[in-house]
Amino acid sequence: MYVKHLDFTNVGPFCEADSDFHPKVNVFTGPNNSGKSTVLWVLGDILVYPFGVPAKLLRQNGPATFNICTDDGVCLTGELPVRRQSRARGGGIENQYWTAVRWADSVKLLEAVGYSKFIPALRRTTDFRSQGPSASLESPDSEPREVNPIERAAVQGSFDFPEIRRVTRRVSEGEPELRRRLSLVSDDPSLVSDEAIIQKIVDLDYRSYLRQNTAMRDIVEKIAQMATEITEGFPITFSGVAEDESGFFPAFETVDGVMPFNTMSQGTQSIIQWLARLIIGYAEYYDFPERLGDEPGVIIVDEIDAHLHPAWQTGIIPTLTNHFPNLQIFCSTHSPLMLAGLGPGQVHLLTRDEENLVQVSRNEQSVAGWSADQILRNFLGVRNPTDRATIRNYDKLEELRAKDELSAEESEEMERLMSAGETPQFAGSASFLINELAREMSNLDDEDASQ
C-alpha cells in the first residue's frame, strides 16, 4: 500500500494543490519559495505522529483542508493541523473539528501506511554525551529520568509543548497505534539535533547486551552500512559505545580511525543522523523483525542532499530503495544529481506562473542518462549552468555572430571571446559551447573560401 494522491488548500503559497504520487520515489524540486517544504510538511502532518505543520503556514483566508488516498482506497479528508486542535478541559477533551470518528479514521490511515518518519532540512550536531542507558532500561521498577532528550524531542514545533504533550498522551492511551508511535523519536518540523539519536544508540547497544539480542545492535550496524554505500569510498563501521569524561557516545571506525560521532564531517554526521532516525524508528515500530526491509513505510526528508558532496548525493536514492523496497520516499532537493536516473513520474517540479501561483508538474519521461547540465536547464531553469560573467561573454559572442558585418573593434572582441573559451577561465559547459561556436564559425569561413 502506498500514498497515491493528495490535494490540500490554504497552506503556505498554495491556495490549492493537487498531486498524484509514484509508489516508490517522489522528489520535489524547484526555486526557493515555490512550496517544496510546504508539501512535505502537509504530508508529515497527515502521515506522521506526533507532528504538526507550522501554524505560520496556515493561511487566514479559510480553513486548511486536505484529502489523501492510498492505492488501496483508504482515504482521509480533514482540516489541518491533524489531531492537534484538541484542548483538555475539565478532564475531558474538546475539539473544534477532529471528533472521535474523524480521529479513528486518521488512525486507520496511519495503520494503513505503516511506519512513517519526517526529517527536516536543518540537522544540528552537538557535543552531547549520554549519561548512560535510559533509566527504564536499567531496572523494571525504576522511574524514567525527568529530563530525557528523547522525551524533550517528542512534540515540538508550533504547539504549546506541555499542553500538547498532555493531550496527545491522554488521547493516545486508548490507541495502541498512537502509543507505539509516541515511543519513537519524533521531530520538529524545522530543526532536529543529534541528542535523541545518540541516546537511542546508547540504549540499543545496552539493550542488545542486556537481552542478548544481536538484532538491536545489527540495526546500528545497518546504519553504518548504508552510510558506507552512500559515501562510496569512505567506509564506516559502528565500533560501539565509548566513554570519555563527559559521558557515553557512539563511535565509528573510518579511514581516519575510530572517531566519536560529533568529530566526523558535517556531511557524514548528517547522513548518519537521518539514517538513524529512519532505521531505528523503523525497527522499533515493527519490533525488530528479521526482514526489516520487507515492511512498508513512508519517509519524508526536506533537503535530503544537505551537506553532501555531489558524488554522495547520487547514492542516496539507490541505497534507500535497495535496502527498503517497500519504503515510499518523499523528499526535496535543489541538486540536479538527485534527479539523475529517476523514472517517469518521480520528479515533481514546482514553479510559479505569470500570476505568481504555484504549479506542480511531473516528468513524463525517464531522467536516466541525462547530464547535470541537461537537468539544470530542463528542470531547474538554469539556462547556462556556469558563472554569470561567462554567460554574459557567451551572450555577447552570439550577438556578434548574428551581425552581417563587424567593425574592427567588434572583430577584435569576437576573436578575444573565442580564444578565451580555450582558457581555464571558461569552465564546464560554457567552454564547450563557446569552443563549439568557434569551430562552427571556422567551418563557415572554410566553406566561404571554398566557394
Image (cartoon, helix red, strand yellow):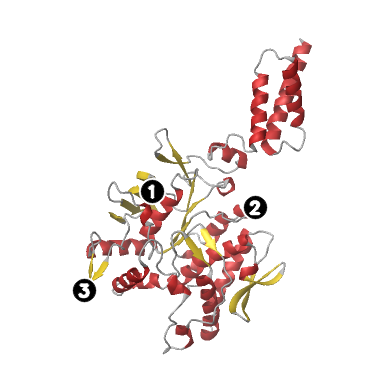
Name the front one of labels 2 and 3. Answer: 3
Label placed on residue 90: 3
* Local SS, label 3: loop
Between 280 and 148, the one lying in front of the other is 148
- The picture quadrant where one finds residue 442 is top right
Query: Residue 437: x and y, percent?
Result: 70, 26
Query: Residue 446: x and y, percent?
Result: 77, 17
Can you say whether 220 is above or below 120 in the image? below
Whether residues under marks 1 and 3 lie with C-beta atoms below 8 angstroms apart, the answer is no
Q: Residue shown at 64%/59% (left/top)?
A: 231
Can you say whether 77 is above or below 405 in the image? below
* Local SS, label 1: loop
Between 250 and 166, the one lying in front of the other is 166
- Classify the position of the C terminus by image quarter: top right
- Compare marks 2 and 1 and give the one earlier in the sequence: 1
Between 235 and 191, the one lying in front of the other is 191
Query: Residue 116: x and y, percent?
Result: 42, 63
Q: Residues within 10 Å of mark 2 (few under 14, many from 20)?
A: few
Tag 2: residue type? Ala
Can you say whether 347 is above or below 418 in the image? below
Write down the residue under mark 2: 311
Rounded to the nearest whole Å, what is the CA distance between mark 2 and mark 3? Answer: 57 Å
Name the front one of labels 2 and 1. Answer: 1
- The picture quadrant where one finds residue 56 is bottom left
- Compare marks 2 and 3 and give the one earlier in the sequence: 3
Label placed on residue 3: none
Tag 1: residue type? Gly
Write down the residue under mark 1: 12
